Image: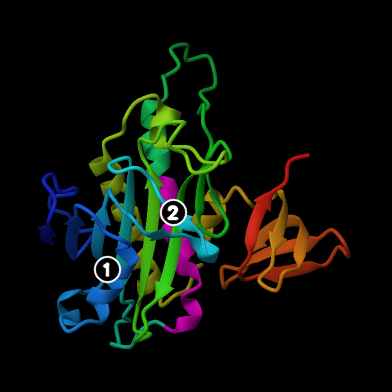
Amino acid sequence: MEFTGTGPTPLFTQSSDAVSRFEYLAEAGSTNDVLVGHATGADAATWPDLSVVVTDNQTRGRGRLGRTWLAPTGKSLAISVLLRPMLRNGEMLSLEHFGWFPLLAGAAMTRAVRTVVAASEVPIQDLREVETPSHEVTLKWPNDVLIDGYKVSGILSELLPTADGLVIGAGLNVSLDEHDLPTLTATSLSLVTGNNPEPDAVLAGYLTELSTLYRAFVAAEGDPVASGLLEAVTELCGTLGTQIRVELPGGDDLVGIATALDLGGRLIVRNQANDELQAVAAGDVTHLRY
């Protein structure tokens, strides 16, 4: 792994097979913009598959649907990963499979956050009791990570202008307190665990999980069943089996029960208006609780 950095205490400096190139920035407007620039610039060849750019001070972060993503310096991570999914025959993975990448990254972050939260749980001393986690960490379709229903991480995937890869950006609330939170529906790892998790460990966990899922998916030529990705996302996805409202790109609302994911990663919803199944490829999902 090649490491470069401009900050006083670079993150993730340990050797890792999870990534090919790692750059830590003391500050960045948007790590996605930085990495897209590297991946399409004059030195694009030096930014291979699984190159990473990270900062804990992102000043112009973007979320889905044009939303902004801001956090105080040093209290969150912005992580962007470059994917150039090439098959064994030297051809790029077909774009029809790219819809799985936001879900893949969301699953990786969910696993990493679960590990951090589980490590903070007080073990049950009486072995006669059934041990259950105090906090529920789930993936909200397509790419938010929730702890007890509150958002701790979000994912933004962007196709390269050259269409020969994509950049996946992840924002993670690490040590924000109540006054730092951008919305009433957000949380942070420190608020949930009661301590300040080590950013390096969280970052390493996410990149390791992402690399593992990604390599299996590409090795299976984008087959979500053979790679195990469909099973992994289904197990982690808290949206499935719940009543939801989806704000569709055209402006309409769809209300119903999320029943499954199809082979393209789309969310299958049983429309409460007509009891028919409808596949959703994109939309803003709200979990309804009555």
Above or below, 189 against 132 in this view is below
Residue ID at (38%, 85%):
163
Q: Is residue 145 left or right of residue 89?
A: right
Residue ID at (39%, 82%):
93
Q: Find the residue positioned furthest to the top.
A: 126
Q: In the rendered image, which residue does mark 2 sit on?
A: 69
Dominant secondary structure, magenta: helix
Q: Find the residue positioned furthest to the right.
A: 274
**Quadrant of the rendered image containing residue 17:** bottom left
The kind of secondary structure element at disc 1 is helix
* Three-letter amino acid code of the residue under disc 1: Val
Which of 172/182 is in front? 182
Above or below, 181 against 44 in this view is above
Give the extent of the magenta segment: 94-111
Q: Decide if residue 27 is in sight here.
A: yes
Residue ID at (46%, 75%):
98
Residue ID at (45%, 16%):
124
Label 1, label 2: how many angstroms apart (C-alpha)? 16 Å
Q: Position of residue 30 (x, y in %)?
A: 33, 62
Q: Quadrant of the N terminus?
A: bottom left
The kind of secondary structure element at disc 2 is strand
Q: In the rendered image, which residue does mark 1 sit on?
A: 34
Q: Position of residue 170 (x, y in %)?
A: 39, 56
**Quadrant of the rendered image containing residue 155:** bottom left
* Three-letter amino acid code of the residue under disc 2: Trp
Q: Decide if residue 227 is in sight here.
A: no
